[in-house]
Amino acid sequence: MQPTTNHIKKGFNIFIGLLCLIGFFLFGVYVGFENRPASQKVVGLINKDAPEELSTNTDFEPFWKAWQLVKEKYPEASKTDNQDHVYGAIKGMLASFGDPYTTFFTPEESKAFESEISGEFGGVGIEMGQKDGLLTVVAPLKDTPAFRAGILSGDKIVKIDGTDSTSISIDKAISMIRGEPGTTVTLSIVREGLSQIKDIKITRAKISIPTIDTEKHPENGVFVIKLYSFSAQSPELFRGALNEFVNSGYTNLVLDLRNNPGGYLDAAVSMAGWFLPEGKVVVKEIGKTDKDVTLHKSRGPGIFNGKIKMVVLVNKGSASASEILAGALSEHGVATLMGTQTFGKGSVQELMKLTRDTSIKITIAKWYTPNGISISDSGLTPNIKLDPNQDENKDVQLEKAINFFK
């Protein structure tokens, strides 16, 4: 039986209908494929999904879309390393918290940081912080290359070896300044009183951090203890200096914490114990909430409490543990605080491993004086303000502190 024209038309219509169905199906697949979440378009990565506690109320779509677009559009995207992009994303995320002391360490940076805290490094001998968004010298350590080259507390470091440093982290700057002893680094600094940027070339050396010096001033009956850092050895060295003070027969003491960038919290608490009775608060540590409070208290023996006259000398290079000790002695009425406003570094960091070879340093708490003043927000204001030293041949601030006892 021969097919009729109607049969042919009917078969053709069915064929066209099937093509339309297939077309609509394929179009739907295409639309669905193109409109799938951006994270599903990124291939070659593992562990892309957000943790469950974040996925319900945090939109990661812009992140994955940016990743996809830059991989598609950037001319040399194929030459870049995805893992480096992940590290960069972590750094950017931490930077959004606005805390210069919360930072991420790549494998190379993590290894360098571990070397630093173990003391196995060459450098120039400066402690850095951040003020007004710029890398700022807290203090040059005594008798180090930076000290001898004329670096001062408060100097703003805007370039390191010609590389702009106004937008890098403190830890990145430290890694750029550190290097083999005998090599050089040039720091471009902005300083109050200078009309233009000053370049200072410094030869790196193995840094041996000084701790303590003592002086006797018999004409005024004043004993001076100059403390340069709060290291693990500082409490025992401080004890020795106090023995020397007792044997001198003097009853007037100047504790000079100028240009002391701090160090171990426990060292500051231990030293405060010589002047405060057991149980007195040395510093308050407040964490994520106001209920997350740790009180660091004096462990005694408090043998100098009320028995001596004391001045604590500070300046803008006094930071961290220096501010803790100075604040406690001042607020408990043990000592008169003299000098200039302190630096204002009052936060606690914890170093944690992220992976086998990367780590993260996070601010977990802030320090407050016994009376509740935030050290981070403003530093300490002296009871008696002294103008900064202007005479290179004599220490005017120390002379005024010594003469205070008259």
Image: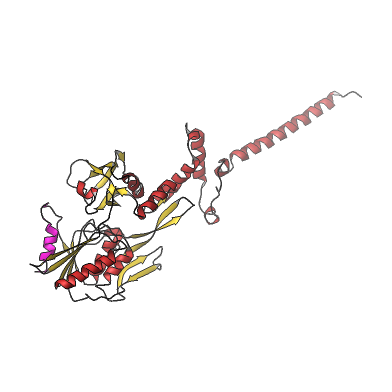
| Res 250 → quadrant | bottom left
Task: Using the image, determine if residue 220 lies above or below residue 92.
Answer: below
Q: Is 35 left or right of 273, judged from the image as shown?
A: right
**Where is residue 286 drawn, in percent x and y?**
37, 65
Please name the residue shown 75% across and 29% down the image: 16
**Where is residue 88 drawn, in percent x and y?**
44, 44
**Where is residue 301 drawn, in percent x and y?**
27, 76
Q: Is 21 left or right of 220, judged from the image as shown?
A: right
> Is residue 390 on the magenta stretch?
yes
In-front residue for pair 174/164: 174
- Which image quarter is the C terminus in? bottom left
Q: Is 270 left or right of 225, judged from the image as shown?
A: right
> Is residue 201 on the magenta stretch?
no
Part of the protein shown in magenta: 386-406
- Which image quarter is the N terminus in? top right
Please name the residue shown 35% across and 49% down the image: 171
In-front residue for pair 187/347: 187
The answer to whether residue 324 is visible is no
